[in-house]
Protein backbone atom coordinates (compact mmCIF):
# COMPACT_ATOMS: atom_id res chain seq x y z
CA UNK A 1 0.00 0.00 0.00
CA UNK A 2 2.00 3.02 -1.25
CA UNK A 3 -0.13 5.44 0.80
CA UNK A 4 1.61 4.30 3.98
CA UNK A 5 5.09 4.28 2.51
CA UNK A 6 5.99 7.90 3.18
CA UNK A 7 5.37 7.74 6.91
CA UNK A 8 7.30 6.20 9.75
CA UNK A 9 5.58 4.30 12.54
CA UNK A 10 5.24 5.75 16.03
CA UNK A 11 7.21 2.70 17.23
CA UNK A 12 10.04 3.65 14.88
CA UNK A 13 10.12 7.18 16.25
CA UNK A 14 10.29 5.73 19.74
CA UNK A 15 13.33 3.68 18.69
CA UNK A 16 14.98 6.76 17.17
CA UNK A 17 14.48 8.66 20.40
CA UNK A 18 15.80 5.72 22.44
CA UNK A 19 18.85 5.46 20.16
CA UNK A 20 19.61 9.11 20.85
CA UNK A 21 18.95 8.84 24.58
CA UNK A 22 21.29 5.87 24.99
CA UNK A 23 24.12 7.85 23.37
CA UNK A 24 23.30 11.07 25.21
CA UNK A 25 23.20 12.91 21.91
CA UNK A 26 20.38 15.35 22.72
CA UNK A 27 23.11 17.78 23.79
CA UNK A 28 24.29 17.99 20.14
CA UNK A 29 20.78 18.24 18.69
CA UNK A 30 20.18 21.97 18.64
CA UNK A 31 17.83 23.09 15.87
CA UNK A 32 20.80 24.50 13.96
CA UNK A 33 22.88 21.34 14.21
CA UNK A 34 20.09 18.96 13.17
CA UNK A 35 19.01 21.27 10.33
CA UNK A 36 22.65 21.37 9.15
CA UNK A 37 22.91 17.58 9.33
CA UNK A 38 19.64 17.34 7.37
CA UNK A 39 21.11 19.56 4.69
CA UNK A 40 24.27 17.46 4.50
CA UNK A 41 22.16 14.32 3.98
CA UNK A 42 20.13 15.89 1.18
CA UNK A 43 23.39 17.01 -0.43
CA UNK A 44 24.61 13.40 -0.30
CA UNK A 45 21.40 12.35 -2.01
CA UNK A 46 21.99 14.91 -4.75
CA UNK A 47 25.62 13.89 -5.10
CA UNK A 48 24.47 10.48 -6.34
CA UNK A 49 23.10 12.07 -9.52
CA UNK A 50 25.25 15.20 -9.79
CA UNK A 51 26.97 14.19 -13.04
CA UNK A 52 24.24 11.91 -14.41
CA UNK A 53 22.62 13.00 -17.67
CA UNK A 54 18.82 13.06 -17.63
CA UNK A 55 18.66 10.17 -20.09
CA UNK A 56 20.89 8.05 -17.82
CA UNK A 57 18.91 8.86 -14.67
CA UNK A 58 16.67 5.75 -14.53
CA UNK A 59 19.66 3.42 -14.85
CA UNK A 60 21.58 5.38 -12.20
CA UNK A 61 18.64 5.22 -9.76
CA UNK A 62 18.50 1.44 -10.24
CA UNK A 63 22.24 1.04 -9.73
CA UNK A 64 22.22 3.20 -6.59
CA UNK A 65 18.87 2.10 -5.16
CA UNK A 66 20.26 1.01 -1.78
CA UNK A 67 22.35 4.17 -1.32
CA UNK A 68 19.33 6.30 -2.16
CA UNK A 69 17.13 4.44 0.33
CA UNK A 70 19.72 4.93 3.06
CA UNK A 71 20.08 8.65 2.32
CA UNK A 72 16.31 9.09 2.31
CA UNK A 73 16.19 7.23 5.62
CA UNK A 74 18.73 9.72 7.01
CA UNK A 75 16.57 12.59 5.79
CA UNK A 76 13.48 11.07 7.44
CA UNK A 77 15.37 10.43 10.69
CA UNK A 78 16.65 14.00 10.98
CA UNK A 79 13.31 15.46 9.94
CA UNK A 80 11.69 13.33 12.67
CA UNK A 81 14.06 14.66 15.32
CA UNK A 82 13.44 18.26 14.22
CA UNK A 83 9.67 17.88 14.18
CA UNK A 84 9.63 15.98 17.47
CA UNK A 85 11.91 18.44 19.26
CA UNK A 86 9.91 21.45 18.10
CA UNK A 87 6.63 19.73 19.00
CA UNK A 88 5.19 20.28 15.54
CA UNK A 89 2.16 18.49 14.14
CA UNK A 90 3.68 17.71 10.75
CA UNK A 91 0.47 16.53 9.10
CA UNK A 92 -1.33 19.73 10.09
CA UNK A 93 1.61 21.83 8.86
CA UNK A 94 1.61 20.00 5.51
CA UNK A 95 -2.14 20.54 5.13
CA UNK A 96 -1.73 24.25 5.83
CA UNK A 97 1.11 24.54 3.32
CA UNK A 98 -0.91 22.63 0.74
CA UNK A 99 -3.82 25.05 1.22
CA UNK A 100 -1.39 27.95 0.72
CA UNK A 101 -0.01 26.32 -2.42
CA UNK A 102 -3.55 25.86 -3.78
CA UNK A 103 -3.92 29.64 -3.54
CA UNK A 104 -0.50 30.46 -4.93
CA UNK A 105 -0.75 28.06 -7.83
CA UNK A 106 -4.28 28.16 -9.25
CA UNK A 107 -4.76 25.27 -11.66
CA UNK A 108 -5.64 27.62 -14.53
CA UNK A 109 -2.30 29.43 -14.27
CA UNK A 110 0.00 26.70 -13.01
CA UNK A 111 -1.05 23.78 -15.20
CA UNK A 112 2.00 22.47 -17.06
CA UNK A 113 4.00 25.49 -15.87
CA UNK A 114 6.99 25.19 -13.54
CA UNK A 115 7.39 28.88 -12.73
CA UNK A 116 7.39 30.08 -9.13
CA UNK A 117 4.18 31.75 -7.95
CA UNK A 118 5.74 35.22 -8.07
CA UNK A 119 6.58 34.67 -11.75
CA UNK A 120 3.24 33.15 -12.77
CA UNK B 1 0.32 12.61 20.96
CA UNK B 2 3.85 13.46 19.77
CA UNK B 3 4.42 9.92 18.48
CA UNK B 4 2.16 10.65 15.52
CA UNK B 5 3.50 14.11 14.86
CA UNK B 6 6.33 13.20 12.50
CA UNK B 7 4.14 11.32 10.03
CA UNK B 8 1.70 12.52 7.44
CA UNK B 9 -1.63 10.78 6.91
CA UNK B 10 -2.28 8.62 3.85
CA UNK B 11 -5.14 11.02 3.06
CA UNK B 12 -2.68 13.91 3.04
CA UNK B 13 -0.40 12.08 0.64
CA UNK B 14 -3.40 11.50 -1.61
CA UNK B 15 -4.09 15.24 -1.59
CA UNK B 16 -0.45 16.00 -2.43
CA UNK B 17 -0.60 13.64 -5.39
CA UNK B 18 -3.90 15.11 -6.52
CA UNK B 19 -2.46 18.64 -6.24
CA UNK B 20 0.36 17.59 -8.54
CA UNK B 21 -1.90 15.75 -10.97
CA UNK B 22 -4.24 18.71 -11.39
CA UNK B 23 -1.27 20.92 -12.33
CA UNK B 24 0.33 18.28 -14.55
CA UNK B 25 3.59 18.72 -12.65
CA UNK B 26 4.77 15.09 -12.72
CA UNK B 27 6.69 16.04 -15.87
CA UNK B 28 8.94 18.33 -13.75
CA UNK B 29 9.34 15.82 -10.91
CA UNK B 30 12.39 13.87 -11.96
CA UNK B 31 14.38 12.48 -9.04
CA UNK B 32 17.04 15.14 -9.63
CA UNK B 33 14.59 18.04 -9.71
CA UNK B 34 12.67 17.02 -6.59
CA UNK B 35 15.92 16.27 -4.71
CA UNK B 36 17.19 19.73 -5.73
CA UNK B 37 13.95 21.36 -4.58
CA UNK B 38 14.24 19.44 -1.28
CA UNK B 39 17.72 20.82 -0.81
CA UNK B 40 16.58 24.37 -1.52
CA UNK B 41 13.86 24.03 1.15
CA UNK B 42 16.31 22.74 3.76
CA UNK B 43 18.62 25.65 2.90
CA UNK B 44 15.70 28.05 3.50
CA UNK B 45 15.20 26.40 6.89
CA UNK B 46 18.87 26.92 7.73
CA UNK B 47 18.78 30.50 6.49
CA UNK B 48 16.37 31.34 9.32
CA UNK B 49 19.14 30.76 11.88
CA UNK B 50 22.24 31.44 9.79
CA UNK B 51 23.36 34.49 11.79
CA UNK B 52 21.72 33.62 15.11
CA UNK B 53 24.07 33.03 18.05
CA UNK B 54 23.50 29.82 19.96
CA UNK B 55 22.31 31.74 23.01
CA UNK B 56 19.70 33.59 20.91
CA UNK B 57 18.45 30.42 19.20
CA UNK B 58 15.40 29.70 21.43
CA UNK B 59 14.08 33.24 21.00
CA UNK B 60 14.66 33.11 17.22
CA UNK B 61 12.80 29.78 16.94
CA UNK B 62 9.86 31.31 18.80
CA UNK B 63 9.84 34.42 16.62
CA UNK B 64 10.04 32.39 13.41
CA UNK B 65 7.82 29.47 14.47
CA UNK B 66 5.37 29.79 11.56
CA UNK B 67 8.12 30.13 8.93
CA UNK B 68 9.87 27.08 10.34
CA UNK B 69 6.67 25.03 10.26
CA UNK B 70 6.07 25.98 6.64
CA UNK B 71 9.65 25.11 5.63
CA UNK B 72 9.41 21.77 7.43
CA UNK B 73 6.11 21.16 5.64
CA UNK B 74 7.88 21.79 2.32
CA UNK B 75 10.58 19.31 3.30
CA UNK B 76 7.96 16.70 4.21
CA UNK B 77 6.05 17.32 0.97
CA UNK B 78 9.09 16.88 -1.25
CA UNK B 79 10.33 13.88 0.73
CA UNK B 80 6.87 12.34 0.28
CA UNK B 81 6.99 12.82 -3.50
CA UNK B 82 10.49 11.30 -3.69
CA UNK B 83 9.59 8.30 -1.56
CA UNK B 84 6.29 7.77 -3.35
CA UNK B 85 7.79 8.06 -6.84
CA UNK B 86 10.59 5.63 -6.04
CA UNK B 87 8.15 3.20 -4.38
CA UNK B 88 10.19 3.09 -1.19
CA UNK B 89 8.92 1.75 2.13
CA UNK B 90 10.27 4.61 4.25
CA UNK B 91 9.61 2.99 7.62
CA UNK B 92 11.51 -0.14 6.60
CA UNK B 93 14.38 1.97 5.24
CA UNK B 94 14.57 3.95 8.49
CA UNK B 95 14.62 0.72 10.53
CA UNK B 96 17.45 -0.65 8.39
CA UNK B 97 19.44 2.57 8.73
CA UNK B 98 18.84 2.60 12.48
CA UNK B 99 20.17 -0.99 12.71
CA UNK B 100 23.26 0.11 10.75
CA UNK B 101 23.73 3.09 13.07
CA UNK B 102 23.48 0.80 16.11
CA UNK B 103 26.48 -1.09 14.71
CA UNK B 104 28.43 2.01 13.69
CA UNK B 105 27.86 3.83 16.95
CA UNK B 106 28.13 1.34 19.84
CA UNK B 107 26.87 2.98 23.03
CA UNK B 108 30.18 2.38 24.81
CA UNK B 109 32.11 4.39 22.18
CA UNK B 110 29.53 6.92 21.05
CA UNK B 111 28.04 7.98 24.38
CA UNK B 112 28.38 11.76 24.72
CA UNK B 113 30.62 11.82 21.64
CA UNK B 114 29.65 13.58 18.41
CA UNK B 115 32.41 12.17 16.20
CA UNK B 116 31.55 10.34 12.98
CA UNK B 117 31.82 6.56 13.11
CA UNK B 118 35.05 6.54 11.10
CA UNK B 119 36.63 8.85 13.70
CA UNK B 120 35.36 7.04 16.79
CA UNK C 1 40.64 38.50 -20.94
CA UNK C 2 38.45 35.74 -19.49
CA UNK C 3 41.40 34.18 -17.64
CA UNK C 4 41.26 37.01 -15.11
CA UNK C 5 37.50 36.89 -14.73
CA UNK C 6 37.34 34.35 -11.92
CA UNK C 7 39.39 36.40 -9.50
CA UNK C 8 38.56 39.43 -7.43
CA UNK C 9 40.99 42.30 -7.04
CA UNK C 10 42.87 42.90 -3.79
CA UNK C 11 41.18 46.33 -3.72
CA UNK C 12 37.77 44.62 -3.84
CA UNK C 13 38.68 42.38 -0.91
CA UNK C 14 39.72 45.49 1.00
CA UNK C 15 36.29 47.01 0.31
CA UNK C 16 34.55 43.82 1.46
CA UNK C 17 36.52 43.88 4.70
CA UNK C 18 35.77 47.59 5.18
CA UNK C 19 32.05 46.96 4.53
CA UNK C 20 32.08 44.35 7.31
CA UNK C 21 34.13 46.49 9.69
CA UNK C 22 31.80 49.47 9.34
CA UNK C 23 28.83 47.31 10.30
CA UNK C 24 30.68 45.49 13.07
CA UNK C 25 29.68 42.16 11.55
CA UNK C 26 32.85 40.23 12.33
CA UNK C 27 31.08 39.07 15.51
CA UNK C 28 28.58 37.11 13.35
CA UNK C 29 31.23 35.71 11.02
CA UNK C 30 32.21 32.49 12.71
CA UNK C 31 33.40 29.79 10.32
CA UNK C 32 30.10 27.95 10.80
CA UNK C 33 27.92 30.99 10.12
CA UNK C 34 29.77 32.09 6.99
CA UNK C 35 29.89 28.51 5.66
CA UNK C 36 26.13 28.24 6.27
CA UNK C 37 25.52 31.55 4.49
CA UNK C 38 27.69 30.32 1.61
CA UNK C 39 25.55 27.21 1.36
CA UNK C 40 22.34 29.24 1.36
CA UNK C 41 23.68 31.36 -1.54
CA UNK C 42 24.61 28.30 -3.60
CA UNK C 43 21.14 26.88 -2.93
CA UNK C 44 19.63 30.13 -4.26
CA UNK C 45 21.76 29.71 -7.37
CA UNK C 46 20.46 26.17 -7.83
CA UNK C 47 16.88 27.28 -7.19
CA UNK C 48 17.03 29.34 -10.39
CA UNK C 49 17.19 26.15 -12.47
CA UNK C 50 15.52 23.65 -10.15
CA UNK C 51 12.55 22.96 -12.44
CA UNK C 52 14.20 23.83 -15.76
CA UNK C 53 14.52 20.98 -18.26
CA UNK C 54 18.00 20.48 -19.70
CA UNK C 55 16.82 21.59 -23.14
CA UNK C 56 15.43 24.85 -21.69
CA UNK C 57 18.57 25.60 -19.67
CA UNK C 58 20.31 28.01 -22.11
CA UNK C 59 17.18 30.14 -22.42
CA UNK C 60 16.71 30.15 -18.63
CA UNK C 61 20.33 31.24 -18.05
CA UNK C 62 19.83 34.11 -20.47
CA UNK C 63 16.57 35.19 -18.83
CA UNK C 64 18.11 35.05 -15.34
CA UNK C 65 21.58 36.34 -16.19
CA UNK C 66 21.54 39.21 -13.68
CA UNK C 67 20.18 37.06 -10.83
CA UNK C 68 22.86 34.46 -11.53
CA UNK C 69 25.63 37.07 -11.52
CA UNK C 70 24.41 38.44 -8.19
CA UNK C 71 24.23 34.95 -6.62
CA UNK C 72 27.73 34.13 -7.89
CA UNK C 73 28.93 37.44 -6.44
CA UNK C 74 27.46 36.40 -3.07
CA UNK C 75 29.29 33.08 -3.32
CA UNK C 76 32.56 34.86 -4.11
CA UNK C 77 32.06 37.34 -1.28
CA UNK C 78 31.43 34.67 1.35
CA UNK C 79 34.25 32.48 0.03
CA UNK C 80 36.55 35.52 0.28
CA UNK C 81 35.59 36.10 3.93
CA UNK C 82 36.17 32.43 4.78
CA UNK C 83 39.53 32.26 3.04
CA UNK C 84 40.65 35.60 4.49
CA UNK C 85 39.57 34.78 8.04
CA UNK C 86 41.30 31.39 7.98
CA UNK C 87 44.45 32.92 6.43
CA UNK C 88 44.43 30.43 3.56
CA UNK C 89 46.44 30.84 0.36
CA UNK C 90 43.61 29.87 -2.00
CA UNK C 91 45.73 29.61 -5.13
CA UNK C 92 48.15 27.23 -3.42
CA UNK C 93 45.23 25.17 -2.05
CA UNK C 94 43.69 24.93 -5.53
CA UNK C 95 47.01 23.82 -7.02
CA UNK C 96 47.38 21.12 -4.36
CA UNK C 97 43.82 19.90 -4.95
CA UNK C 98 44.40 19.88 -8.71
CA UNK C 99 47.54 17.76 -8.21
CA UNK C 100 45.48 15.36 -6.07
CA UNK C 101 42.78 15.21 -8.75
CA UNK C 102 45.43 14.45 -11.41
CA UNK C 103 46.32 11.36 -9.37
CA UNK C 104 42.74 10.35 -8.60
CA UNK C 105 41.55 10.79 -12.16
CA UNK C 106 44.21 9.53 -14.58
CA UNK C 107 43.33 10.62 -18.11
CA UNK C 108 43.30 7.02 -19.36
CA UNK C 109 40.58 6.04 -16.87
CA UNK C 110 38.64 9.28 -16.46
CA UNK C 111 38.39 10.41 -20.08
CA UNK C 112 34.71 10.89 -20.96
CA UNK C 113 33.74 9.23 -17.66
CA UNK C 114 31.89 11.08 -14.89
CA UNK C 115 32.30 8.46 -12.16
CA UNK C 116 33.86 9.36 -8.83
CA UNK C 117 37.46 8.23 -8.33
CA UNK C 118 36.43 5.44 -5.96
CA UNK C 119 34.15 4.03 -8.66
CA UNK C 120 36.58 4.37 -11.58
CA UNK D 1 50.09 39.31 1.65
CA UNK D 2 46.52 38.33 2.61
CA UNK D 3 44.99 40.62 -0.03
CA UNK D 4 46.04 38.18 -2.75
CA UNK D 5 45.02 35.07 -0.88
CA UNK D 6 41.40 34.92 -1.99
CA UNK D 7 42.15 34.89 -5.69
CA UNK D 8 43.48 32.24 -8.01
CA UNK D 9 46.07 33.02 -10.67
CA UNK D 10 45.17 33.13 -14.37
CA UNK D 11 47.76 30.36 -14.82
CA UNK D 12 45.87 28.21 -12.31
CA UNK D 13 42.61 28.73 -14.19
CA UNK D 14 44.40 27.68 -17.37
CA UNK D 15 45.48 24.47 -15.64
CA UNK D 16 41.93 23.81 -14.42
CA UNK D 17 40.62 24.21 -17.95
CA UNK D 18 43.37 21.97 -19.33
CA UNK D 19 42.58 19.33 -16.67
CA UNK D 20 38.97 19.31 -17.84
CA UNK D 21 39.84 19.31 -21.53
CA UNK D 22 42.16 16.32 -21.19
CA UNK D 23 39.37 14.32 -19.54
CA UNK D 24 36.70 15.52 -21.96
CA UNK D 25 34.53 16.57 -19.02
CA UNK D 26 33.02 19.72 -20.53
CA UNK D 27 30.12 17.48 -21.63
CA UNK D 28 29.18 16.97 -17.93
CA UNK D 29 29.65 20.62 -16.99
CA UNK D 30 26.20 22.07 -17.58
CA UNK D 31 25.38 25.02 -15.34
CA UNK D 32 23.05 22.79 -13.33
CA UNK D 33 25.60 20.04 -12.81
CA UNK D 34 28.45 22.33 -11.77
CA UNK D 35 26.15 24.33 -9.48
CA UNK D 36 25.01 21.05 -7.90
CA UNK D 37 28.60 19.91 -7.45
CA UNK D 38 29.42 23.29 -5.89
CA UNK D 39 26.59 22.81 -3.43
CA UNK D 40 27.80 19.32 -2.53
CA UNK D 41 31.28 20.70 -1.78
CA UNK D 42 29.94 23.46 0.46
CA UNK D 43 27.84 20.84 2.29
CA UNK D 44 31.02 18.80 2.86
CA UNK D 45 32.62 21.93 4.31
CA UNK D 46 29.68 22.38 6.67
CA UNK D 47 29.71 18.71 7.61
CA UNK D 48 33.12 19.23 9.23
CA UNK D 49 31.55 21.40 11.93
CA UNK D 50 27.98 20.10 11.95
CA UNK D 51 28.11 18.73 15.53
CA UNK D 52 30.83 21.03 16.88
CA UNK D 53 29.79 23.35 19.71
CA UNK D 54 30.67 27.01 19.20
CA UNK D 55 33.20 26.87 22.04
CA UNK D 56 34.96 23.89 20.43
CA UNK D 57 35.04 25.48 16.96
CA UNK D 58 38.62 26.92 17.03
CA UNK D 59 40.07 23.56 18.08
CA UNK D 60 38.03 21.74 15.41
CA UNK D 61 39.22 24.15 12.69
CA UNK D 62 42.81 23.51 13.73
CA UNK D 63 42.35 19.74 13.75
CA UNK D 64 40.64 19.76 10.32
CA UNK D 65 42.72 22.50 8.69
CA UNK D 66 43.84 20.39 5.70
CA UNK D 67 40.34 19.03 5.02
CA UNK D 68 38.93 22.55 5.15
CA UNK D 69 41.57 23.85 2.72
CA UNK D 70 40.80 21.05 0.27
CA UNK D 71 37.03 21.67 0.48
CA UNK D 72 37.55 25.40 -0.05
CA UNK D 73 39.77 24.57 -3.03
CA UNK D 74 36.92 22.48 -4.47
CA UNK D 75 34.55 25.41 -3.98
CA UNK D 76 36.98 27.77 -5.73
CA UNK D 77 37.51 25.29 -8.59
CA UNK D 78 33.81 24.83 -9.27
CA UNK D 79 33.10 28.55 -8.90
CA UNK D 80 35.89 29.19 -11.43
CA UNK D 81 34.33 26.79 -13.95
CA UNK D 82 30.91 28.40 -13.51
CA UNK D 83 32.21 31.93 -13.87
CA UNK D 84 34.43 31.02 -16.82
CA UNK D 85 31.73 29.11 -18.67
CA UNK D 86 29.19 31.91 -18.25
CA UNK D 87 31.78 34.52 -19.27
CA UNK D 88 31.18 36.56 -16.12
CA UNK D 89 33.50 39.30 -14.85
CA UNK D 90 33.46 38.19 -11.21
CA UNK D 91 35.20 41.25 -9.81
CA UNK D 92 32.70 43.57 -11.49
CA UNK D 93 29.80 41.42 -10.24
CA UNK D 94 31.16 41.51 -6.68
CA UNK D 95 31.52 45.30 -6.85
CA UNK D 96 27.94 45.67 -8.07
CA UNK D 97 26.66 43.39 -5.31
CA UNK D 98 28.67 45.28 -2.73
CA UNK D 99 27.12 48.56 -3.94
CA UNK D 100 23.68 46.97 -3.59
CA UNK D 101 24.52 45.76 -0.09
CA UNK D 102 25.67 49.27 0.87
CA UNK D 103 22.16 50.47 0.01
CA UNK D 104 20.34 47.57 1.65
CA UNK D 105 22.38 47.72 4.84
CA UNK D 106 22.99 51.37 5.79
CA UNK D 107 25.59 51.54 8.54
CA UNK D 108 23.21 53.38 10.87
CA UNK D 109 20.67 50.55 10.74
CA UNK D 110 22.86 47.50 10.22
CA UNK D 111 25.66 48.19 12.68
CA UNK D 112 25.94 45.25 15.09
CA UNK D 113 22.68 43.84 13.70
CA UNK D 114 22.49 40.52 11.84
CA UNK D 115 18.94 40.87 10.50
CA UNK D 116 18.23 40.57 6.80
CA UNK D 117 17.58 43.84 4.99
CA UNK D 118 13.84 43.17 4.73
CA UNK D 119 13.71 42.82 8.52
CA UNK D 120 15.88 45.84 9.38
Image (tube, coloured by chain):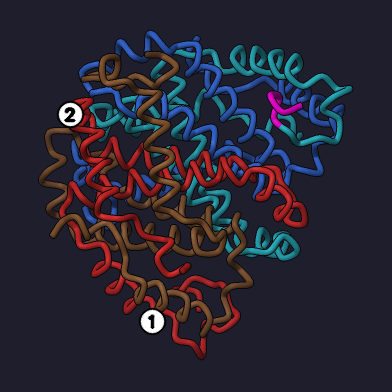
Chain colours: A red, B brown, C cyan, D blue
Q: Is residue A46 left or right of residue C81?
A: right
Q: Which residue occupies 40% across, 20% down?
A: B117
**Residue nearer the viewer, D4 or D22:** D22
Q: Magenta stretch: give its range.
A: C116-120
Residue corresponding to mark 2: A27
Tell me the element at label 1. Answer: helix
Spot occupied by residue C70 in the image (x, y as percentages of width and height): 52, 49
State the CA–CA distance, disc 1 to disc 2: 39 Å
Vertical side of A20 occupied by D49: above or below:
above
Mark 1 vs mark 2: in front? 2
Which residue is at a point 52% across and 39% down the rendered structure image?
A44
Sequence-wise, the earlier of marks 1 and 2 is 2
Residue B52 picture location, percent across and down: 21, 39
Report the predominant secondary structure element of the magenta stretch. Answer: helix
Q: Nearer the viewer, residue C14 or B90?
A: B90
Position in image of residue D46 (x %, y %) = 41, 30
User: Mark 2: few, some, or many residues within 10 Å (few <14, many ≥20)?
Assistant: some
Query: Splitting the image into 4 quarters, where does residue A14 fall?
Result: top left
Q: Quadrant of residue A28?
A: top left
> Is residue B35 shown left or right of residue B16?
right
A72 lies left or right of D104: right
- The answer to whether any part of residue C24 appears in the image is no
> Within the magenta stretch, is there residue D28?
no
Would you name the residue on which mark 1 appears? A102
| Host chain of mark 1 | A
In this rendering, the count of numbered labels is 2
| Dot 1 alpha-carbon crowd within 10 angstroms: few under 14, some 14 to 19, many 20 or more | few
C119 part of magenta stretch:
yes
Amino acid sequence: MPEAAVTIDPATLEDLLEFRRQRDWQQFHSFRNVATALLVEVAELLEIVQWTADAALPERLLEKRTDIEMELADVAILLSYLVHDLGIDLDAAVRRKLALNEERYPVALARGNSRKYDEL
